[in-house]
Amino acid sequence: MNETMDISIDFSRLKLANPVFTASGTCGYAEELADFMDVNQLGGFITKSVTVKPRMGNDTPRVVETDSGMLNAIGLANLGLEAFIQEKLPAISKLTVPVFVNVAGETIEDYVAVAQRLATEQAIAGFELNISCPNVAKGGLSFGTDPAQVTEITSAVKQAAGDKILMVKLSPCVTDISVIARAAVEAGADVLSLVNTFTAMVIDIESRKPVLANRTGGLSGPAIKPIAVYMVNKVFNEVTKERGIPILGLGGIRTASDAVEFIIAGATAVAIGTANFVEPNCAVKIIEGIKKYCDGKEIKNIRELIGSLE
Amino acid sequence: MTEETFKSNRGVFDAVVFANKQIRQRFYRLGLEFSGDGAAAFAQTRPGQFAEIDLSDVKLPPKEEIAEDLQDSAERKVLLRRPFSFCDVISQRGKTRVEILYCALGPATLRMTTLSAGNSVSVIGPLGNGFQMPADKKTALLVSGGMGAGPLIHLAKAITTEYPQVEVTAFAGAKTKTELPFEKPLDEISRQLGFALHEFAMYAVESQLATDDGSIGYKGFVTDCFSQWLGQQRSLSANDTIIYSCGPEAMLARIAKIAEDKKIDCQVSMERMMACGIGVCQSCAIKCRVEGSDEMVYKLCCKDGPVFDSREVVF
Ligand SMILES: Cc1cc2nc3c(=O)[nH]c(=O)nc-3n(C[C@H](O)[C@H](O)[C@H](O)COP(=O)(O)OP(=O)(O)OC[C@H]3O[C@@H](n4cnc5c(N)ncnc54)[C@H](O)[C@@H]3O)c2cc1C
Ligand SMILES: Cc1cc2nc3c(=O)[nH]c(=O)nc-3n(C[C@H](O)[C@H](O)[C@H](O)COP(=O)(O)O)c2cc1C
Ligand code: FES
């Protein structure tokens, strides 16, 4: 195989060495992974959500396994903007991989405050706007399901973000994801990432109570992959293709062929979430697997593959 | 990371099964051997630390061998790794052998029972922080409930070899005689001499056994057995004593209360559902007090624990 095969991609105003990211909330702030993988081999890294104030998160149990998936209701537990800058940013600035900070909040002002404060940080390539978290009482998903709010929040953050790349992360929990996608793109999103988790519930039949303390959680993992692939393809056809906006596709990716499916469906890049828990180094293996696939199919440039669904 | 110079002391390693023995109905002891970097990493394992094992590809036992009450949950697929601590770690000639005491109670642990010598499994570890050793203590009291015995057996070995001046006594509880996580409780005579359990007697550690139904040993909760025993110890100095406990959370809460009342230091090994085991997902939160304030914070069982000072934990 051609070891040096070029699978680099254009990702909005960035050029990335390869199309594989790790997904927000599944790889912390990168330093935690030092013993398990070389983060710099990734195409991009996305942090756990950062909010203006620290958040304790929900009570436990916060996770439960399901057939081929898992539910989580972490509740955006994170150290808050200031501690992120003090404690995490110095290590992040030593990375060579482009790092995106996932931003969450309860109000539009919250999102703007985080973006504004970080807009001048050299260490950061851009933001991923989490308007799709199903596990918080305020903000989160409620922003991401109403096109008018998506427009408002995207344009407000776009202004605050300066020249940083703005990704907007979409929820799959909507009737027509293209409506939301269009709202985000028209308000200035540089990239769309999809999907976040699906709101779901697991019931303990002994106690007749939900297993998660938060009652509901977000379903992720291989179980959601076919729906995510479908949504990526739909948004690609209906919204992003004609506008030349890249999609970061995610949801249930575990193998290189999963990743290739997303790319054929229309994703320019992909992100790995739940699968990191099973195999912390799997993103790097997936990068190798994508190269192998391209090599085997005599694909000279991975760009040929993007949205190549017949 | 690429520029890192020190060799990592944890990682993802393949281990080869060298033994997997049923010791009781539902209870097993699994032996895993590491070579190379895995051997070096696991040789450093401290009692109370754990590993995340991938059991998703391991086959289920034949249906007729699965206990009636587990037939249903056996049907569930396994995606995530499962956390286990060790009851023994031995490092020799470049190989490290670890043993895990486990209970078959769900889809992953049922699969675990079919592992046999020569099989390979992927293991992440060693993870978390183990028990703090009783360097400045004279007495160490080990209290376990059910499967919690595993890491305390490992701890008994570590204390007796590294701190021979410390006197160790163990208390082990279980629901009933058939649900003891021990191979062979010693005979009546040994029991009267204070050595109820072979696993602790091996290290010359006295032990007492309690079952909820009294089918063997003390009748009642191990916490009551322990608290009665403690009440009889006239010469025990609280300052020179430390309690180590591992088991169901309700039991740990009672032990923490006993320790607080008697002003004895106490360390508890906690459990939470874990998705990653390495501190990135925030699923394993444990509510903790902040010393000197009314504030509460969540710490991570996998990273800050699983062993905590009992005064810190909000049960
Ligand atoms: C740090 C740590 C060390 C552990 N050490 C051991 C050990 O040495 N030996 C051993 O037998 N078990 C140990 N466990 C528990 C073990 O991880 C669970 O029994 C196992 O995950 C069950 O998987 P399953 O698929 O068979 O059952 P599941 O169906 O997943 O679970 C069966 C039952 O166990 C509970 N459970 C599942 N996972 C956990 C968990 N991580 N913590 C607490 N309860 C859980 C579930 O709520 C359910 O009631 C440890 C857990 C932790 C967190
Ligand atoms: C434990 C856990 C925590 C997550 N935390 C966040 C988060 O903080 N912000 C966010 O935008 N998405 C978060 N996600 C969603 C993932 O980034 C991803 O969108 C989703 O899990 C689907 O991908 P997967 O199936 O590959 O995991 C989280 C997912 C999991 C499983
Ligand atoms: S299990 Fe993921 S942070 Fe503890």
Image: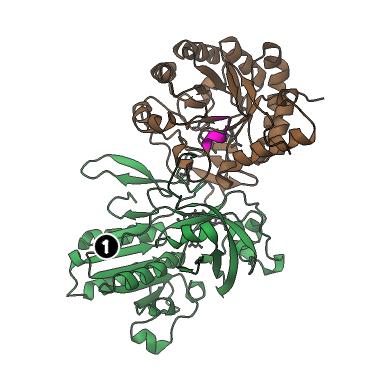
To which residue does mark 1 refer?
B258
Q: Is residue A85 left or right of residue A268?
A: left
Q: Is residue A108 magenta?
A: no
Q: Quadrant of residue B113?
A: bottom right
Q: Amino acid at mark 1?
A: Ile
Would residue A216 be visible to someone looking at this image? no
**Quarter in which the N terminus of chain A is drawn:** top right
Q: Where residue B125 sits: x, y (%)?
A: 49, 54
In this view, the residue in front, A259 or A226, is A259
State the extent of the magenta-drawn residues as a range.
A39-44
Q: What hue represents chain B?
A: green
List x then y, in percent, for residue A118.
41, 20
SS state under label 1: helix
Question: Image height check: is B114 above or below B37?
Answer: below
Residue drawn at (36%, 72%) of the image = B171
Q: What color does chain A have in the rendering?
A: brown
**Residue A176 lies in what quarter of the image?**
top right
